[in-house]
Amino acid sequence: MDTVPKVLATDEALALIRQLQDKYGPVMFHQSGGCCDGSSPMCYPEGEFLLGEQDVRLGEMGGAPFYMSQAQYDYWKYTQLIIDVVPGRGGMFSLEGPEGKRFLTRSRVFTDEERKALGLP
């Protein structure tokens, strides 16, 4: 089995990422842990969100790296994150806020075969 992505984006999310990259340059994502903006994936200009030693890079979407804290990853490591877009205001610190759309994290549990390919018990 090919490498199983831990995070991926819908076509709508990829289109919004490209729009934000055109406007702001390279961007990055960090999955919010529930403070202030709930549990939304937050989009920042690349380098403007300071990553900590406990942040885990899950992959990238449309050239934008995606991170979350190790503690949160420990809970979500058996799920594939699917970043989508819905109408509404994004997080107050997230770049998509003024666009009338917001990123949303959906998920699905990895199959037994996918977990094995990822080295998860």
Image (spheres, helix red, strand yellow):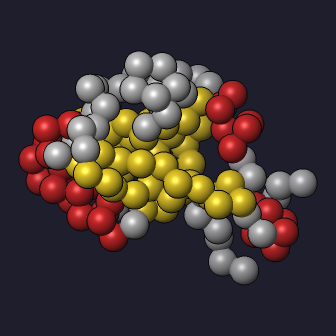
The outermost residue toward the left is 23
Identity of the residue drawn at 65% across and 60% down: 108
Give residue 109's position: percent from left, percent from top: 71, 60
Give residue 62's position: percent from left, percent from top: 34, 61
Q: Nearer the viewer, residue 109 or 28?
A: 109
The outermost residue toward the right is 121
The outermost residue toward the front is 88
Which quadrant: the N terminus?
Answer: bottom right
Up-down: is 112 above or below 55?
A: below
Which quadrant: the C terminus?
Answer: bottom right
Identity of the residue drawn at 12% across and 53% down: 22
Identity of the residue drawn at 64% across and 68% down: 4
Tell whether 42 sits left or right of 97: right
Give residue 36's position: percent from left, percent from top: 41, 19
Q: Nearer the viewer, residue 109 or 23?
A: 109
User: Within the image, what quadrant is residue 5 found in?
Assistant: bottom right
Across the whole image, how many numbered discs are drawn on residues? 0
Residue 55 seen in the current view: no
Residue 12 seen in the current view: yes
Up-down: is 35 above or below 47?
A: above
Give residue 58's position: percent from left, percent from top: 56, 48
Identity of the residue drawn at 62% across and 25% down: 54
Tell whether 109 sits left or right of 91: right
User: Within the image, what quadrant is residue 56 found in?
Assistant: top right
User: Within the image, what quadrant is residue 44 found in?
Assistant: top left
Tell whether 12 sits left or right of 19: right
